[in-house]
Image (tube, rainbow, N blue to C red):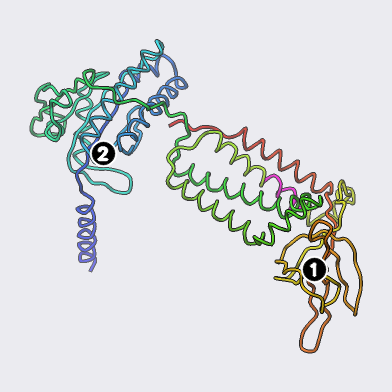
Amino acid sequence: MSNVYRESYFRSVSRQIRRSRRPVTILFTDVEDSTAYWDEYGDLDGRLMIDLHNRLISPVIKRYRGKIVKHIGDSIMASFKSPRNALKAAIAIQQILEKRRNEDEAFRLRVRIGVHAGKALVEEGDIFGDAVNLAARVKGLAKGNEIYVSSSMASLSKKEDFALTKVGNFLLKGKQTEITVYKCRWQEYPDLIAGIEENVFVQVVRRQKLEFLIYSCASIGIIYFFFLNYLRYLLADKEPLALLSLRLQLILDARIAIPAALGILTLLVVFLAIRTKIIPHLALSLLKGGFGLAMGFFLFYGPAHYLHYAIGPAWNKTMHQSDHLFVEVLEERVKLRRAPSEASAAIFKVPKGTILLLADVTKKQKMTWNKVLVGQGEYGWIPRIVPAKIGVPKRRLSIANKFYFTYLDLGALVAGLAGFFWGVLSFRVRPI
């Protein structure tokens, strides 16, 4: 039974491997004399040199529709669907390095490049097979500032178009037959690097994409929390802003519109996290600051809010209170009437969560009514509680409160700001 299972397993794996085999062009770069550079200048300068190599070459590969498969020490392995694009990328890499050498006398980076086209196994972002090995061997024949290509690569490209010259036949390590290798006279090729600049952005790998998503969600969440618990009361405390806010709330239900907008923004962030390859450094540092703000605020606010009786009355002292009392609507589509009576005509229906300025309170027919500002010099009435009737329980339609900003809120805000600065200052660009 085990033998049958084993044979079935290997047949399944073999079919999957065969399905992953497809034509591909492999490009290898390698920094010449990198070992001597590391030995002379040390680990730090050596790593910075490799990072600069990667930042110069990555945008070139992207421009010519290539994909960086992996970084191997001081080498880059890239794949291309089009052999012509692979050769153009190789030429552009040498051109951009030469341009940098002409601009900076201290820049001494010299790269050799090998390119080969053949069939390989393409599996989940990695590539395996003889084509990869052969491309690496061809690269090993070249010297700094040279581009070598295999015979199969040359046969797929017009030799005249890419100024290919036969170097000779070589028996490469691990091969049983010789292959012909060509050299590309890239200095004769027209400029291919117009508009390509050194990559000054943060390269986004899978871990950084996850961080980007977490930072974004935390930043969006803390903004929404601040709006619900602080900002909307501070804005509504001024009559002109309160009227403007009311008009907006009658058009857009803030409980739905704001979460919907933030949800769309979050989806956009997710999309960008998946699709984006580069992100500006400032954007990520600010997002990490937003994450730190959320963490610092809630790490203080959560325990202090639930233990405010135990931590002493000082934290509960009021630093600021609103000039007005606010009436918050607690049910959906509550009728705002012209007079404090259920028989009075309705001015309009107010959505749940709406904040209104309280002007007066009166009690009529066992009902308490809040007089609220609804326009310039115009007022309406909204009930606080509808008494119970036969078969209908008592309902609270609105509640009146003042806005208070306490030392507890201040402490949480200071902790949040400390978290924000920690996030911004602790963000580091990872070398690539």
Name the residue: 23% across, 51% down: 20
Name the residue: 17% across, 40% down: 118
- Majority secondary structure in the magenta region: helix
In the image, 263 versus 115, the foreground residue is 263
Q: CA distance from mark 1 to mark 2?
A: 65 Å
Rate crowding at label 1 as few (under 14), some (14 to 19) or many (20 or more) other CA atoms within 10 Å: many
Q: What residue did someone put label 1 on?
A: 398
For the N terminus, give its image quadrant. Answer: bottom left
Question: Which region of the structure is painted magenta?
Answer: 295-303
- Amino acid type at mark 1: Ser
Name the residue: 49% across, 33% down: 430
Q: Is residue 133 above or below residue 320?
A: above
Rate crowding at label 2 as few (under 14), some (14 to 19) or many (20 or more) other CA atoms within 10 Å: many
Residue 220's label in the rendered image is none
Name the residue: 44% across, 48% down: 274
Q: Earlier in the sequence, mark 1 or mark 2?
A: 2
Residue 117: quadrant of the picture: top left
Residue 82 horizontal/vertical position (percent) = 22, 39
Q: What residue did someone put label 2 on?
A: 80
Residue 317 horizontal/vertical position (percent) = 89, 49
Residue 352 horizontal/vertical position (percent) = 71, 66
- Residue 297 is one of the magenta-drawn residues: yes
Tell me if 142 is positioned left or right of 181 in this view.
Answer: right
For the C terminus, give its image quadrant. Answer: top left
Residue 195: quadrant of the picture: top left
- Amino acid type at mark 2: Phe
